[in-house]
Image (cartoon, rainbow, N blue to C red):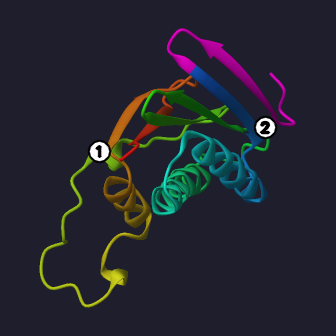
Amino acid sequence: MNVNGGMKAVENAAGKEIILRLPLQPEGLMTVRMALYGVAVRMGFSFEAIEDLKVAVSEACNHALLGLRGDRQDAVLMLVFSMQTGELAVRIGIQGASVTFRDALSPAAEPPGTVDSLDAIESGRIGLYLLQALVDEILVVPGETEGSEEIWLLKRLS
């Protein structure tokens, strides 16, 4: 595994995939956003859909950064952009550390009582709630590391 990061493209019967591996550090999020932008433009997504995807993928990556259990300097952020006819699936996972995404599957609901500000909502869940609004489908599957999960975000062309 190349922990310094890297990108490769593969083509299979189902479509094309771009695999991006980066050290799990905040500085890598700009690279993730630029790669996503290039893929989404190539596929013909609208500006608004691309912005939705960038926010959703950034929130999932931020969740992974914030949810990292222990100080794992060797952890690698792995993204797979799967380009199918009419849809883009982005798979986000961590290699070398445990991170969970299952909260993204919980319905976004207002907390009990009245909410005067976003401060009343658990800060770690706000980004996961955004995912539900910005993509067409979310899947959470077991990751490569024991106790870790990957999140798959699916966005369809309009």
Identify the residue at image location x=46%, y=56%: 49
Task: Give the residues drawn in magenta, as a range.
Answer: 1-15
User: Residue at the top extreme?
Assistant: 13
Mark 2 crowd level (few <14, some 14–19, many ≥20, 10 Å Cα): few
Q: Mark on residue 121?
A: none
Q: Which residue is mark 2?
A: 74
Under mark 1, the amino acid is: Leu
* Front tag of 2 and 1: 1
Q: Tag 1, which secondary structure?
A: helix
Identify the residue at image location x=62%, y=53%: 65
Q: Tag 2, which secondary structure?
A: loop
Q: Which residue is mark 1?
A: 105
Q: Nearer the viewer, residue 69 or 61?
A: 61
User: Residue at the front extreme?
Assistant: 44
User: Is residue 107 rendered magenta in the image?
Assistant: no
Identify the residue at image location x=68%, y=29%: 19
User: Is residue 2 rendered magenta in the image?
Assistant: yes
User: Residue at the right extreme?
Assistant: 4
Under mark 2, the amino acid is: Asp
Task: Point out the image quarter for the N terminus.
Answer: top right
**Do callouts 2 and 1 mark residues in contact (Cβ within 8 Å)?**
no
Residue 143 on image: x %, y %: 51, 26
